[in-house]
Each structure stands twice: as C-alpha cells, then as structure tokens.
Image (cartoon, rainbow, N blue to C red):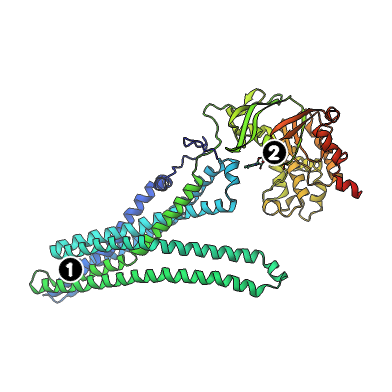
C-alpha cells in the first residue's frame, strides 16, 4: 500500500499528536486550570488526613502533661486543630468530587470529538480496511482511558506522593532514624510494586484478551440462535461455549494467583513496617529520645502510609492498561491522512463539466496496475455509458473522478482544473454518485433523502422521491417519510434502498452525475420507469453510467468499453455494433438487454 511519506493531516482536522504521551497532554491542555485546582484540592484532602496523627500527638502530649482540671480548656488548641483538619478534609474532598464531575464529562466529550473529527478526514482506503464498529469502539475506549488516567494520576498517585513525602518529613522532624526507616521502606515498596506490576501485566493482558474472545463467541452464538434452534444444536452450543469458558476460567485463575502473590508481598511488607516501627519507636521512647505523643504519631503515620500503599500495584496495572488502550487508539486513528487538500487548493467551479483523464496510471497495490497511462476526454454534457467485464476498472474509473483514490501519475481534470489541486469538498458538492449498493443512515427516510440538500422542504423531498419512484413504497409504510430504515438501511429491500439513493442524488442536482449500476437491483419495469426520470434529470449534465445490463445505456451519447483497464472500444451504440467487436458480442449475448438464460426462460 503506498504510504504518504511525511506525516500529513487534513487542514481542518485537529492537530492530534501521534505519540501516546503527547496525545494525552494535548487532550488535557485546555483543562490546565481545572487540573491545577484539582491538585490543590487533593493537597488539602491529603494534608487533612496526614495531620490527624499530628493533632493526636499534640493531644496525647497534652494529656501526659496535664496539670489543671479542665481537660477541654487546656487541650483547646490541638482539639481545634483536629476539628479544623476534618473540616478541611471533608470540604476539599467534596470539592474535588465536584471538579471530577464537571471536568470529567467535558474531558470525555472533548476527546471523543477530537478523535471523531480526525477520523472523518481519512480516505476511503482507510475505511475499507477498518471495521466501523471497531473504530467506534476505539474512540470510546480511548476517551474513557484518557479520563481514567487523569483521575489515576490526580486522585491516586498525587495524593500518595503527598502522603508519603509529608509523613517522611514529619517523621524526620521527630527523629532522623525513624524518618529514614520509613523513607527506605517507601522507596523499596514503590519500586518493588512497580516491578511486580510490569511482571503481572502480560497475565492481565492475556486475561482481557481471552475475555473479549469469549464475549465474541457469545455474541456470535446469540446472533445465530435461530440456526442453533433450527438444527437442534442447543446442547452442542453449550458444550462449544463451555470450552471457551473453561479457558477463560483457567487464564483468570493464573492471573488471580499472581495477584495473590502480590498481596502476600504487600501484607508482609506492611507487617514489617508496623512491627519495625513499633520496635524502633519503643526503643527510642525508652531512651527518652521521643515523647509518647511522638510515638503515637509515628504509629498513626505508619498506618496511613500502609493503607495508601496497599493498592499501588493494582494502580500501576491500571495505568498500564489505560496507556495501552490509548496507544492502541492513537495508533489506529491518528495515522497520516492519505488524501488531503493541498495548501494552495482552490474551490472547483464546474461550468461545463468536461472530464479528462491524462496519462493516468493507477494501482491499488503497487504490483497490480488497474490503469496504465489512460487517456480519455468526456465532453461537457456528454452522457457516457461504461461497459466491460467484471474487474475491468469501471468502478475504479469513477472512484478516481471522486478522488477517493489518487493516481500514482497523470492527471484528472474537470473543466481543465486538476482535481488534485482543488478543495475536496468543492469537488464532492458538484459531483454526485449513485453507488451499486448504497447504504443509508439509520435515520428517517425523510432525513436520508434530504441529505442531498439539507435545507430542502418536505415538498421537495416528496418530489425527489416521486421521481425516483420511491414515493409509492414510502406512502405504503405506516410511518411514511418518518420511518427509520435500520442500520445501513437493512429494513429496506435492495431496490428500495437504491431508489432512496437516486432520490437524494436528484435532490442534490449536481452538474456531474456518476451512476455505478444505479438501477441494477431493480426489476425491469421499475427500472424502465425510473430511467425516464433519470434521463430527464440528466438534462445537460455530464453523466457517466456503468451498467452490466446494456439496454440501460444503449441510448446514451457514447459508450466506452473497458477491458483490463484499457478502453478498447469507444463510440455510439450503432457504431460499436457495426465494429462487431467486444460490445457487439456482449450485446448479442444479452439479446438486446436480457441475459441468455433469462431469454431462454421467456
Ligand atoms: N479497494 C480495492 N483495493 C484493492 N483492489 C481493488 C479495490 N477495488 C477494486 N480492486 C481491484 O481493481 C480491479 C478493478 O476493479 P473495479 O471495481 O474497478 O472493477 P469493475 O469494472 O467495477 O468491476 P464490476 O463490474 O465487477 O463492478 C479489480 O481487479 C479489483 O480486484
Ligand atoms: Mg464495479
């Protein structure tokens, strides 16, 4: 696949970076203020809880040296401190809860929008090689992970960092040895937890992959439940699923056992710290180096550190998971755009609709050329039919005019303007296509037809539908023009879908009209009826119509016969018949419009 070498992105697309960390920072950039606020609030919350042991120390020391009778009076200050700390903790934690709600929802919305806008500018080739459902899932997953990672850092790592450093500072203040002991413990604990998380990650990843595989199997089985019933294979399916469930359970067991080992480490490390600190603080107290209050404070801080540290490995694992999700989304979506407007692109102005292929060489894959130096001119207002064997390049010809793909060399000109030098939107506004297998939005019929001209009123929409002979079947539906058509239009028959596609193109009324087997799904009678309206709608437009059923194009001004990417015959219907070549043979085989087997059965 030819890849554009320097990373290029469409002018109107958001300038998303294609590395994970930069992408996260890009998404967060406009929330700087909120993030600062959140960090401050988290500091408030963490300080509130860390200083509680300090207040208790002051109370204890006060109690130890109590001389007067009124306890509350003499412990007034430390008690007020305790109350103040609790109020601080409550207020800052709830305020950070509010920020989380306000900023979180905006952040998610914003990331989703950025990714979707970027995705819109990808080429048809890109969408041809990625599943729509997969892309939608990626966007949602990436946006969710950006949110999760932000909270992870702001509400987990950041407070833990504060707790650890403030505790160590407080302890250093009490006694250097105590402070160093705890600092050493914290350092080894964090490093070891991180290391364990990196070791555990493959297990967790594998487990997630197996879970999603099993989920896929269940979806497939449910989708095909009618087959299961039809073949009386309920037992078989249960058994089939059971094997996968067993694998899932086994992978789960392995992952959880590993996590269990991590928990062993955590509990032992916690116990060591508790015992170590009790022992050490006791000896210090015994030698009169610290007070009772300081002893209690050390214990309180140790417990606080332990409770904060407990989930660190789990948090690291989550961090890896979110980073992985984002990396995946960025890699899939933030690729170079293949087809973009040139910096100096100008709007295309079609006045006559003359189309010219000048030495066009094109290949989907490097080693298999579809066109090799194709030259052809379609004069303005000419109505041209394309015929030829399947795979001879007809649809590709039309795709190139729409700039869905770009030729490797040569030029395609419309009214003497190279379409590579014009704005893509302006090209698409003035060229209409009716594809062979049109797909529709899961929206009402009215909206689907109105897509051709967004400000069209109900009357214009109904008129277009009448011209496309869609009016009758739409009227016959209980909801009429408000009926929904199902995903991609599945609730309509192929021919009905095609008529909606014709109607919306009639409404668009562009000066160049491309028809790729536009009426192939219709019965001959409906086709004939529509053909007349189409002919009228063609008016003075330049028209290129692809058809296998030759009767649909025989009356056009000119016919081009394609064979292996070359135009082998070119001329009017009678002229080509007289040549007695390809076209003649095709025509004879179809006996004036019917395939031989159909002709025999008549
Ligand atoms: N998206 C694609 N990627 C790679 N190769 C493609 C793609 N589309 C078409 N081709 C190949 O290009 C060649 C020309 O295909 P094209 O669709 O233009 O033929 P066609 O004349 O329209 O055939 P049909 O009458 O069956 O519609 C074929 O060999 C086909 O396999
Ligand atoms: Mg085709």
Residue lying at 46% horizontally and 42% vertically, measured from the top left: 16
- Percent x, y for residue 510? 71, 33
Corner quadrant of residue 593:
top right
Q: Is mark 2 within 8 Å of ligand 2?
A: yes
Check disc 1 and report the residue beneath it.
58
Residue 426: x, y in percent?
Answer: 62, 31
Residue found farthest to the bottom? 69
Q: Residue at x 24, y 60 (%)?
A: 187
Disc 2: which residue = 395
Residue 547: quarter of image? top right
Q: Residue furthest right?
A: 602
The front one of 600 and 140 is 600
Q: Position of residue 154 (x, y in %)?
A: 36, 56
Q: Of 303 and 139, which appears nearest the observer? A: 139
> What is the quadrant of the N terminus in the image?
top right
Disc 1 to disc 2, how far (Cα)? Answer: 84 Å
Q: Secondary structure at mark 1?
A: helix
Comparing 395 with 481, the one in front is 395
The reply to whether discs 1 and 2 touch (Cβ–Cβ < 8 Å) is no
Residue found 38% across the figure and 69% down from its top: 258
Find out if the beta carbon at label 1 lies less than 8 Å from the nearest ligand 1 atom: no
Q: Quadrant of residue 539?
A: top right
Q: Residues within 10 Å of mark 1 (few under 14, many from 20)?
A: many
């Amino acid at each position: 696949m030819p890849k554009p070498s320097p990373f290029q992105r469409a002018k109107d697309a958001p300038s998303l970076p294609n590395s994970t960390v930069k992408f996260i920072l890009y998404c967060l950039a406009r929330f700087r203020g909120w993030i600062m606020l959140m960090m401050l609030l988290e500091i408030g919350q963490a300080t509130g809880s860390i200083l509680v042991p300090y207040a208790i120390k002051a109370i204890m020391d006060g109690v130890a040296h109590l001389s007067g009778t009124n306890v509350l009076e003499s412990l007034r200050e430390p008690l007020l401190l305790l109350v103040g700390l609790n109020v601080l903790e409550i207020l800052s934690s709830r305020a950070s809860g509010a920020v989380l709600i306000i900023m979180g929802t905006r952040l998610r919305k914003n990331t989703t929008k950025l990714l979707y806008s970027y995705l819109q500018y990808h080429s048809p080739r890109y969408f041809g090689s990625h599943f729509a459902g997969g892309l939608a899932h990626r966007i949602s997953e990436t946006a969710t992970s950006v949110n999760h990672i932000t909270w992870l850092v702001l509400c987990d790592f950041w407070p833990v960092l504060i707790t650890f450093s403030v505790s160590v500072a407080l302890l250093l203040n009490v006694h250097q040895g105590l402070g160093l002991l705890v600092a050493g413990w914290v350092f080894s604990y964090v490093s070891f937890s991180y290391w364990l998380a990196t070791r555990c990650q493959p297990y967790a990843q594998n487990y997630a992959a197996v879970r999603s595989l099993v989920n896929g199997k269940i979806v497939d089985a449910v989708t095909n439940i009618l087959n299961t019933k039809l073949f009386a294979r309920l037992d078989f399916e249960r058994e089939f699923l059971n094997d996968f469930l067993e694998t899932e359970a086994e992978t789960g067991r392995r992952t959880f056992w590993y996590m269990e080992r991590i928990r062993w480490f955590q509990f032992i490390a916690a116990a060591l710290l508790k015992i170590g600190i009790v022992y050490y603080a006791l000896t210090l107290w015994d030698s009169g180096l610290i007070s009772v209050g300081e002893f209690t404070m050390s214990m309180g801080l140790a417990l606080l550190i332990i409770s904060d540290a407990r989930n660190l490995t789990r948090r690291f694992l989550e961090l890896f998971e979110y980073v992985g999700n984002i990396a995946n989304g960025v890699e899939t979506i933030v690729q170079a755009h293949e087809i973009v407007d040139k910096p100096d692109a100008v709007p295309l102005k079609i006045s006559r609709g003359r189309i010219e292929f000048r030495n066009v060489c094109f290949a989907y894959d490097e080693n298999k050329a579809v066109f090799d130096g194709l030259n052809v001119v379609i004069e303005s207002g000419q109505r041209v039919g394309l015929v030829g064997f399947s795979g001879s390049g007809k649809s590709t010809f039309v795709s190139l005019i729409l700039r869905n793909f770009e030729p490797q060399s040569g030029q395609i000109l419309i009214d003497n303007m190279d379409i590579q030098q014009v704005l893509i939107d302006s090209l698409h506004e003035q060229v209409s296509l009716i594809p062979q297998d049109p797909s529709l939005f899961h929206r009402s019929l009215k909206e689907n037809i109105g897509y051709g001209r967004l400000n069209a009123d109900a009357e214009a929409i109904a008129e277009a539908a009448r011209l496309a002979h869609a009016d009758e079947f739409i009227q016959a539906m209980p909801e009429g023009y408000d009926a929904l058509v199902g995903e991609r239009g599945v609730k309509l028959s192929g021919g009905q879908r095609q008529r909606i596609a014709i109607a919306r193109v009639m409404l668009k009324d562009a000066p160049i009209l491309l028809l790729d087997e536009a009426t192939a799904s219709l019965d001959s009678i409906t086709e004939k009826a529509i053909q007349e309206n189409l002919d009228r709608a063609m008016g003075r437009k330049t028209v290129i119509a692809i058809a296998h059923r030759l009767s649909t194009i025989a009356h056009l001004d000119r016919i081009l016969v394609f064979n292996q990417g070359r135009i082998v015959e070119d001329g009017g219907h009678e002229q080509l018949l007289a040549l007695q070549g390809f076209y003649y043979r095709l025509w004879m085989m179809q006996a004036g419009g019917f395939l031989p087997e159909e002709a025999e059965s008549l």
